[in-house]
Image: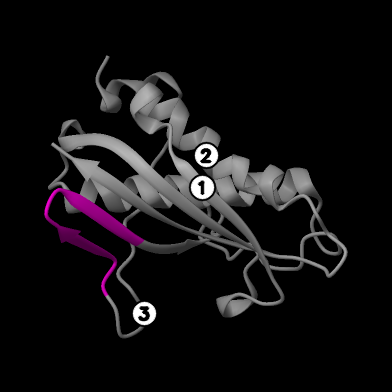
Amino acid sequence: MSFENKIKELKLVLPEAKAPVGSYVATKKSGNLLFISGQISISANGELIKGKVGKDLTTDEAYKAAERCGLSIVSQVKNACDGDLSKVKSCIKLTGFVNSTEDFTEQPKVINGASDLVASIFGEEGMHTRAAVSTNSLPLGVSVEVDAIFELN
């Protein structure tokens, strides 16, 4: 099954691939590697998902925020591949950042939202290495940010 068909089967809607708002690019190819800049947690209606996990958001709510980051990552990959996800060979790595309270320790459970989303679309090719990092703040006050590295055919 193609990755596009898998997205349809899962009834997922990819958000628009957003242009960066700073002095960087959204994606960068180097050889057969595709680097995706950090994608922040934005709801389906375009609102920022903000707040500290462990205070303002539960682990489950933050998981959903990370899932939204994963959708944005796939959207950026598709854009960088001129709309053709068949160019993806594999997801190499995700790095997730969780805006969390000092005593919150479930960052891996939060970033599973992005990991599970990528794996659900790309199957075995979506299995990746990962880091899940706690931080005391993220841009614009968002709860989660995830970046990625993909390998292209």
Residue 30 magenta: yes
Residue drawn at (76%, 67%) of the image:
52
Q: Is residue 10 left or right of residue 135?
A: left
Question: Residue 72 location in percent, x, y?
Answer: 41, 52
Asked if marks 1 and 2 touch (Cβ < 8 Å), the reply is yes
Question: Residue 80 location in percent, x, y?
Answer: 19, 53
Q: Earlier in the sequence, mark 2 or mark 3?
A: 3
Q: Which mark is residue 115?
A: 2
Q: Which residue is mark 3?
A: 21
Asked if marks 1 and 3 touch (Cβ < 8 Å), the reply is no
Q: Residues within 10 Å of mark 2 (few under 14, many from 20)?
A: many
Q: Which residue is mark 1?
A: 130
In the displayed structure, would residue 10 be above or below residue 144?
above
What are the residue bounds of the magenta stretch? 25-36
Q: Is residue 13 left or right of residue 63?
A: left
In the rendered image, the quadrant that contains the C terminus is: top left
Taken as a whole, is the magenta stretch helix, strand or loop? strand
* Secondary element at image label 1: strand
Residue drawn at (40%, 18%) of the image:
9
Label 2 and label 3: CA atoms lie apart by 25 Å
Question: From where the camera sits, is residue 93 visible?
Answer: yes
